Image (spheres, rainbow, N blue to C red):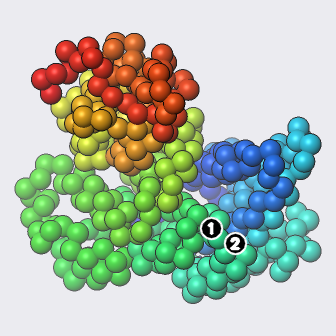
Amino acid sequence: MTLKQYNWKNGPDLIQQHSVAKHRILQAYLAAYFRTLVSSPNQDVLRLTLVDGFAGGGLYVHNDTRETVKGSPFIFLEATREAEFVINKDRRKPVQLQVDYFFTEADHHAYTHLVKVLREAGYGDKIGNGIFIEEARFQDKADAIIAFIKKKSPKNGRSIFALDQYGYKEVPTQLLRKIFDALPSAEVILTFGVDSFMNFASDGDQVKDLLDGLGIPDIFGGRSVEEIKSSDRDWRLFLQSTLYRRLVENCGARHFTPFFIRNRGGHGDYWLIHMSQHHRARDVMTEVHWANNNYFIHYGGAGLDMFQMVGYDPVHDASYLQQSPLGFEFDDVARRASIAALNEHIPRRVYADDTGISFGELFATTCNSSPASAQIYRDSIGQLLAEQIIEVVPADGGRRRSAAQIKATDQIIASNQRTLFAAI
Ligand SMILES: C[S@@+](CC[C@H](N)C(=O)[O-])C[C@H]1O[C@@H](n2cnc3c(N)ncnc32)[C@H](O)[C@@H]1O
């Protein structure tokens, strides 16, 4: 399936609901990001660079409602304005958000339209002065943008890159690695057209060249795509999980979320992959998934191996699929299934070591493989505590009665009553 591309030659183009979903997630994530970063009462400045690598033309018309829809550059700009207001309204010492924006757009009509609508919206005098817009390919500007961020925030390179490509070819893992190597606090929100990729995946040099170009050669372990298709009933899932694993392994980020944006109209699901170097950032994004569950779907339930390590293994425990046949929908059914799965898997991790495991380590080392947020881990630990399967020991000794206040440094150990799991 070829993706329909936007055209801003004659003004705003039509946008489909499943692309608007991306905007909602970006908006929700930015709001949560600012809230999380500016939690210290003594902080007075936050330096941040927001990069929209595939910026588009700025405005759309909604395909169903015909309402005007703002594109990602406006979402970035308005998220900062709103955050500044919300953060400072009750603070004695206001925080100044020093945010620079880079918008790159390769298409001439889109670029021209973007500049026009930003000017019309009153951002004209900021263009060239905090808002840097270039008619260029993101790949060609990435080095200069990274250098700017390093100079502005030498310690942490705090930045968010939205890389909302069409399809899957424009952002190779080499480019992602460059960002993460240079900027320790960078985060990337990458669109990856996994359905388009799957449809393209057939034998021959073309696929090999494509994978080489993406920096993920030989992802199918020497097997040909034809072989996989003929031998594996779930070949799409197999290809997806392999592709996903290689993509995130090669991009240099420690943490990631790989959930799908669903396209209710049928084919055309894509990944919105959030990549970061810190599990806290990963958890903020996971919470956004749970809070916006009507946009997301996760097909792990049909066998992606991200779940075999810590969540449930849905191939063996697919009870929720009877209630949500589409897959894991980040709803109450999925929440209950996640808690039930963690109730089994956390004790296994805890019992594997005589000294147990700290909550921080448990979460940091397993969250990539689970759709659960830290809150869901806490809910599970709360149940395990109540059932006396584990105990939680705070750094200063004693025992926690509930998991509500659990800290990263708390040690989770086997309870003396470990009868139920003793055989595991
Ligand atoms: C999916 S659209 C982006 C939509 C936009 N992020 C939004 O949410 O409003 C992809 C955009 O990237 C532009 N584009 C394609 N290849 C590009 C490249 N290599 N670098 C920068 N922009 C590119 C296209 O012209 C198109 O406007």
Image coordinates for residue 338, horizontal then vertical, percent: 37, 29
Q: Is residue 36 visible?
A: yes
Image coordinates for residue 143, horizontal then vertical, percent: 58, 85
**Residue at image location 41% in from the left, 52% down from the top:** 258
Disc 1 to disc 2: CB gap under 8 Å:
yes
Image coordinates for residue 229, horizontal then vertical, percent: 14, 59
Task: Report the image quarter containing ligand 1.
Answer: bottom right
Considering only vertical position in the picture, is 266 above or below 207?
above
Quarter of the image with the N terminus in it: bottom left
Q: Tell me which amino acid carries mark 1.
A: Asn
Image coordinates for residue 286, horizontal then vertical, percent: 50, 43
Question: Circle 1 sits on which residue?
Answer: 156
Question: Circle 2 sits on which residue?
Answer: 153
Q: Residues within 10 Å of mark 2 (few under 14, many from 20)?
A: some
Quarter of the image with the C terminus in it: top left
Q: Is residue 236 visible?
A: no
Could you tell me which secondary element the residue under label 2 belongs to? loop
Q: Is residue 372 left or right of residue 294?
A: left
